[in-house]
Amino acid sequence: MGKVARLLVAIVGLWLANAQAEPLRLVYPDFPPYTTNSKPPLAVGNFLLEKIMQHMDQSYQTRMVPNYKRALSELENDKADGLFLASRNNQRDHIAEFSSPLLHNNWSWFFRYDTFLDPYSAAFKSQAKVASIEGTNTHFWLLQHHYRVIGKQNDVKKLAQMLFDLKRIDAAFLSADVFKESSDHPNLVNDEYIEVVQSATPFGIYISKSYLAKHPDFMTRLNQAINTVQKQYLNNSYSLSGFNRDAAAR
């Protein structure tokens, strides 16, 4: 092999090494208890992601954004390679690929403890005033199914105030764990509400299609790592209640 050929091989090898060394850029919303930028211990989503990346021997960096709407924008504008934790929808599927489910998350209706309504009735859908957190799949679901959505709330505290204090809405609809695990309102701390589960929805990791085009084996390795980490830190329910942070390696 001539000097020029050896030089080209060396350059290509160096380029590949640098490309492989580039960290995976991930964004996540402030969505406690699943993801948050709080002090240790890490939120369950941040913790599980760390274990998954360690299993893959994958360098990565994370950055918190205000909400899911912003997170999706980061993927669309190639400012991030992935988003966690998230449930599926067509808008996200258009620009990214959804991993194997990591956790399962209940979507629930929440009512004031003295004013229960039937969320499955036609009258509720046409007359009840409801709200969710802007940019979430629960918010999109309400709009798609033509409920009477009131306002655009950015966090649990404001949503709880609309329901319990101001009584501007008849029900809140969102991730059950997100609502119930919040300490931002006395009704949530004291369990003073009625919950009706609408459905169970899988949470996973979205990886942009542009990143996968450059790393075609990444999703296979990611799903294998998710399966391993699930067996170690989650029980068969794959829910927040089955999460064991201190689980010994198996």
Image (spheres, rainbow, N blue to C red):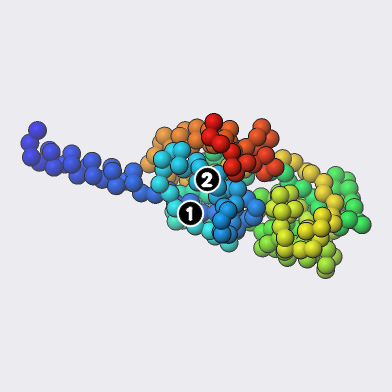
Tag 1: amino acid: Thr
Q: Tell me where residue 184 sits by quadrant.
A: bottom right
Query: Residue, x 52% and y 45% (percent of image)?
Result: 49
Q: In terms of sequence position, does the residue under pointer 2 or pointer 1 come before the other? A: 2
Image-based side of 138 in relation to 61, left or right: right
Which quarter of the figure is the C terminus placed in?
top right
Q: Residue placed farthest to the right in the image?
A: 114
Q: Residue 61 appears at what percent x and percent y?
A: 44, 53
Of the numbered discs in the image, which one, if any, rests on residue 211?
Answer: none
Q: Is residue 94 visible?
A: no
Disc 2 to disc 1, C-alpha distance: 10 Å
How many circles with numbers are drawn on the protein?
A: 2
Image-based side of 233 in relation to 128, left or right: left
Disc 1 is placed on an element classified as strand
Tag 2: amino acid: Leu
Q: Which residue has dot 2 on it?
A: 49
Query: Residue, x 83% and y 68% (percent of image)?
Result: 166
Q: Residue 19 appears at what percent x and percent y?
A: 32, 46
Mark 1 Cα within 10 Å, few/some/many (few <14, many 20+)?
some
Q: In the picture shown, does residue 88 fall above or below 148? A: above
Residue toward you, 3 or 195: 195
Image-based side of 200 in relation to 213, left or right: right
Query: Residue, x 44% and y 56% (percent of image)?
Result: 79
Q: In the picture shown, does residue 21 fall above or below 158? A: above
Q: Residue 195 appears at what percent x and percent y?
A: 82, 49
Q: For the residues labelled 2 and 1, say whether their Cβ atoms are less than 8 Å apart.
A: yes
Which quarter of the figure is the N terminus placed in?
top left
Q: Which residue has dot 1 on it?
A: 62
Disc 2 is placed on an element classified as helix
